[in-house]
Every structure is written in structure tokens, then in C-alpha cells.
Image (spheres, rainbow, N blue to C red):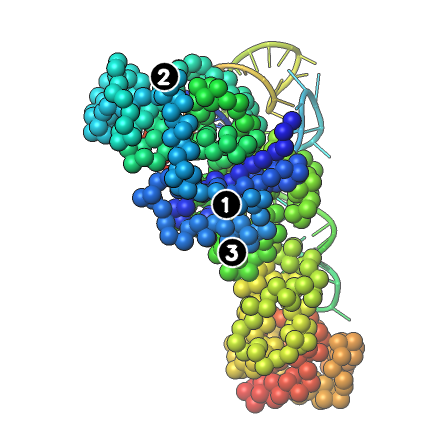
Amino acid sequence: MSKVRTRFAPSPTGFLHIGGVRTAIFAWLTAKQNGGEFILRIEDTDQKRRVEGAEEHIVESLAWLGIKPDEPLVRQSDRAKDEVYKKWAEKLINADRAYADPYSAEEVQTFREQAAKDTKPFLYRNHRPDSPPKWDGKTPLRFKSEPKKYITKDEVMGELKTGPEVIDDFILIKSDGYPTYNFAHIVDDLEMGITHVIRGQEFLASLPNYRNLYEALGEKEPAFITVPHILNEQGNKKLSKRDGAQDILDYRALGYLPEAMINFLATLGWNDGTEQEIFTPEELLQKFSLEQIQKGSAHFDERRLAWISGHHIRSKPLEKLYELVKDFWPEATKNYDDNYKKKVLGLVQERMKFFAELPELTQFFFEDLPVNTELMTGHKQLKKLPKEELKQLLEKAEETLKQIDFSAKDLSKRLNKLLEETGQKPVVLFSLIRIATTQSPSSPGLAETLEVLGKETALRRIDQQLKAL
RNA sequence: GGUCCCUUCGUCUAGUGGUUAGGACAUCAGGUUCUCAUCCUGAAAACACGGGUUCGACUCCCGUAGGGAUCACCA
């Protein structure tokens, strides 16, 4: 068998979204795990729909995920300039398998409406002209189909049975001279030696027509792999921007790890048959298989993404993580050195789902927040105690903290001792100190937090709190 | 509407004639001498429905319902 070659062939009509990326991941995994090649081809034969910058965006999105095409990017518009598609069209014309469409768009529309009125499916081939004019390149060129039954094998969908009624004379070359997707992608897949055509289910219905064309061309078909769509959370429609299908690069901006994104998308509608949920890209390369892709569409679940993302963040060595988050520190951190920030990061690593949470999680490590009395008054346990008692308790804590080194070990030892001395419950004493020193409802462990904050800052903040009490 | 595809906890899924229908996310409860998170334990939670076939159906067949895709000089 020849070397596996797959391609991802998006049209440059906007950003790359979740569903498209997953298809790309599947194609990439298929190529790479077989020692094959993955190619990026831009399907830009519709000049009207072309969006400026979309191509760069696609390339960048894939690059972020670590998906590198093995060959230079291919653009259909460039290939059209070289008359590649014309050449193949001539072949079909000479074999009497293509003809010039003599009708105007309006006339075809009339046929269509008539069919609708007769409640019959519209088939262009019912109107196929007896003696079509010679094709001059100014009118559409149509495929002369040979309707028949097909049993099409799709690696994911299984065997698809279709009747001759789905085969029709589709347009090969538009009146603007550009080939349609239907024609161009087949020519390109053939010339580029694509062995596995992996694409979304919107093309499933066209498969029999493509097969008819392969036959007319006398060429061997690739393996067909049809991947179901990803639906929005409610599951009532294909994911689109409106429903929160964000640009894949939005996730980069939020600070999701690319390997988490790959893990999430690859396991949306696919699993290896075991109970493994977390996969590194390397593991996916090893374990992925097309046969285990789900036939039905899957629903996008942001919470699952968050969980997977947190998992990947936790598994990073601190040094590595520190590199990755460097663009996510807020302004207030610029006066702090690497060592300090690294310690802070170490404390919040296990509670971060994506890097954009970093400022919120770490704010009090970098600046004194104003005393927020509601933290006390709204606290389940603290609000039960009279202010005077809280004040005494906090003063006592301050005394203790003044006398010790701020190492986590020492801190937790002394804090526990203080618990005994005051006879207080941890929830009261620790919450009190936490609120005083962080002005936040939650933080990493108290001893660790105080250690990183340092003696001076901690005592200063306790003083502030005391004044406010 | 025609054609094609799909249907197991809320979600992602395991399951290929005999299982207490398993796991994960999310949810809830408890534990890890404080909060949040992590981690651990536990709970609640599903075979869309109706007929067959069979000694026996989540598994096979046929309907019904629901969902999705497609029916362009878009991809």
C-alpha cells in the first residue's frame, strides 16, 4: 500500500472553529501515526466568499496546535491559474462525460420550481440538452453523470446504500472559469496522491456523485472518512459562532494549552475503548484509530474542556508552566521578580483551568487590596463572633506572627499552636487571618500563602484590618 | 418534502444475545485538623418508544418518534 497522505482543506471564509479543527486533528493523526504526510490545502475557488486574512488565520491556528503540514501550502486559486482543472475538464469533454450548460441560472431556477410544484425531486439531468453547444469557457461546464446504485464504504459511517436518484449532473467549472469544490477537490486529491479523504458530514450526501466522477475519470478512489459534526451545548444545531463556537485562537487568548485542546477535541466523539480520558498528543498518535470514531454528532461541553485543561496545567513542571504563562501576568506584577512570581504560580497551579484566570487568582500576592468588611460580616462563622473578640484574636495572631520566621513549616506549626492557645476552631482563626492578609474569600493554604507574602506584607495588612475593625 | 446518517445517565462514552449496564465531566454528600482548588470515598443519574426474532434482548429485524446532514455557478 502506498504511503498515507491526508489533507485538511478548509475554505478561507473566516476563522477556524472547533469542528473544523477536530477534522484537521483527525486527518493529522491519521497521517502521522502511519508515518505518512499531512497537507494543508486552501479551497479558495469562490472568490466572492474569500475573507482577507482567513488563510493566515488557519495556518496560525494549526501551528498553535502543533500541527505542521509536511508540504508547502497549496492554494486552489493558484492551481487554477496553471489550468490544472481545465486540463482534467478537457479529458472529460473528450470522453463525452462533460458538456456545456446552455441554460441561464434563471432557466435552471424555473426547472427547479416546476419540479417543486410537481413535488418531484429536481434533477438537472432530466433537462440535459440533446446537442449541447461546444464549451467556450464562458458557460458552466457540467458533468455528464451515469446514474446508478452505490454501496459506498465509509471508514466511519460504514456501508452507505444509495439509489440512482441521488446522482446528478453537477457543475464542474463555473462561468467565472473557476472549478467548483466538487470538481477541484477531486482533481487535487488525485494529483496530490491523497489516500484518505477525511471531512465533515456535510459532504456525505455528495459521496455517490464523487464516486461517479472518479469512475468517469477512470481513477482509483481514496478511502472515505466522514466525521460527524460537533453540535452546540443544547445539541439542536451545528456549532457556529452564534452558539459560542469560538474561533480556536480565542482559546489560545484565554490561555488554554494546545495539548489540552487536542485532547478535548480528539476525545469528543472518539475514544480508544479503554477508560483513559487524558491523552498527550504522543499517546493520541499511538492510540488513535478512525474505526473508533463515533457515528453520531457530539455536543460541545465547555466544562469538560475546563477539566481537561486543568489536568494538563497541573501536569506541567513549574519551570515550564512559568514560561507558558508569562504573557498573562497583570500590570501590577511587573515590579516583582521571577522567583516571587514562580512561587505564586506554584501555589495556584492546581486551581487554574486556563491562564486568563491568573490575575484573579493571584491579585493579592501583588497588591494590598482595600479592606473589605463584607468578607467578615458575610462569613458563616466569623459573623457569629462579636467584633471585639475578632479584634483580640487578630491581635494575638499578629503577636505570634511577629515572633517567627515566615517559613511554611514554622508557620503551620505556630498557627496550630495558636489554635490550642486560643481554643478556637481552625475555620475561625484561619479564616480571620486569611481575610486580613488577602482580602479575598479564598486563597491557597494559609501557611503557604503567608510564606510567599512575607512577614512585612502580612503584618502590614493585619494592621490595616485591625484599624478597620 | 425527497435522500442519507444517527439515538446508552444532563454531557462525552464502554458495551457486539445472558452484565448488579462500567468509566469520565458536571451535580450532591462526606473526608484530607481553614477557604478555594487538588486528591480520596460515596450518592443520584441512561439503554427514545412500539412490535417482532429468540429460552433470553441495550445488543439482531421492522416500524414510530426525535435529532442531524444534504437537495447552489458555497465549500
Quadrant of the frame with the N terminus of chain A: top right
* Image coordinates for residue A378, horizontal then vertical, percent: 54, 73
Q: Amino acid at mark 2?
A: Asp
- Depth check: give the residue in front, A54 or B14: A54
Q: Earlier in the sequence, mark 1 or mark 2?
A: 1
The residue lying at 57 percent from left, 78 percent from top is A334
Secondary structure of residue under mark 1: loop
Say which residue label 1 marks: A73
Q: Quadrant of the C terminus of chain A?
A: bottom right
Label 3 element class: helix
> Is any atom of residue A369 visible in this view?
yes
Which residue is the site of mark 3?
A251
Chain bearing tag 2 is A
Q: Amino acid at mark 1?
A: Leu
Q: Relative to residue A436, is residue A152 depicted above or below?
A: above
Dot 2 falls on a residue whose secondary structure is loop
Displayed quadrant of residue A332: bottom right
Which residue in the structure is indicated by mark 2? Answer: A96
